[in-house]
Image: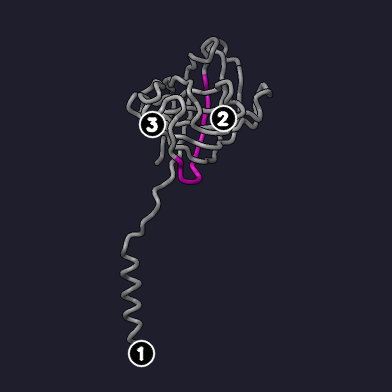
């Protein structure tokens, strides 16, 4: 009896091994860095330098943006952000920060959020908690980078809206204007 079952079990194992498994879609992550001229910082133009990694850790939740009215998807995430703003003349540091990513969000095409950049490509928010800053008064607050992957012509902007400094949630940014960067932003999804 045992000998008769062995070929049948072997055939079953081979068949199960050939059936493709239904894997969950990969979770998105966004990476990048470079230098951009920040012309909408509220003062004199500044050079912005930085790098970041934001990796989703679980499936996202889709909801309507309170200001733009479009559907956005928010993911819990992990990662790091390093950034520095400096004067255009003299390259004097205005602020530098290091932070831990808490979430990422896909805002959809830029045309839906009037965010600048390429109207047809998605805008992503990388929300982070500032762990260290110089000057030090910004530590323990939150800020965001808004980025867009366009292959060769990528865009980015910071978001430090009043009222969002104490908010750890993605999907709340409503004031940003994407500007070209010299560097690379890649959305992996």
Q: Which mark is residue 1?
A: 1
CA–CA distance in space, label 1 to label 2: 67 Å
- Examine the rendering and report whether any part of residue 7 can be seen: yes
Tell me: residue 160, above or below residue 9: above
> SS for tag 3?
strand
Tell me: residue 109, above or below residue 5: above
Residue placed under numbered mark 2 in the picture: 82
Residue placed under numbered mark 3 in the picture: 108
Q: Is residue 60 magenta?
A: yes
CA–CA distance in space, label 3 to label 1: 61 Å
Q: Position of residue 26 (x, y in %)?
A: 41, 47
- Give the foreground label among 1 and 2: 1
Q: Position of residue 141 (x, y in %)?
A: 63, 28
Tell me: residue 65, above or below residue 17: above
Q: Which residues are magenta?
A: 48-61
Can you say which quadrant of the picture contains the N terminus?
bottom left
- Examine the rendering and report whether any part of residue 185 can be seen: no
Label 3–label 2 contact, CB within 8 A: no
């Amino acid at each position: 009896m045992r000998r008769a079952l062995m070929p049948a079990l072997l055939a079953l194992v081979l068949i199960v091994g050939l059936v493709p498994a239904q894997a969950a879609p990969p979770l998105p992550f966004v990476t990048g860095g470079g230098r951009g001229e920040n012309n909408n910082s509220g003062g004199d133009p500044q050079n912005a330098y930085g790098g970041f990694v934001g990796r989703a850790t679980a499936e996202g939740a889709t909801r309507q943006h309170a200001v733009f009215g479009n559907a956005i998807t928010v993911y819990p995430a992990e990662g790091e952000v390093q950034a520095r703003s400096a004067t255009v003349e003299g390259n004097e540091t205005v602020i530098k920060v290091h932070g831990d990513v808490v979430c990422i969000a896909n805002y959809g095409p830029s045309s839906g959020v009037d965010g600048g950049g390429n109207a047809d490509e998605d805008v992503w928010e990388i929300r982070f908690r500032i762990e260290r800053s110089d000057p030090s008064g910004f530590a323990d607050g939150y800020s965001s980078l808004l980025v867009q992957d366009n292959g060769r012509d990528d865009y980015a902007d910071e978001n430090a809206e009043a009222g969002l400094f104490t908010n750890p949630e993605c999907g709340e940014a409503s004031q940003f204007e994407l500007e070209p960067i010299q560097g690379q932003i890649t959305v992996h999804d």
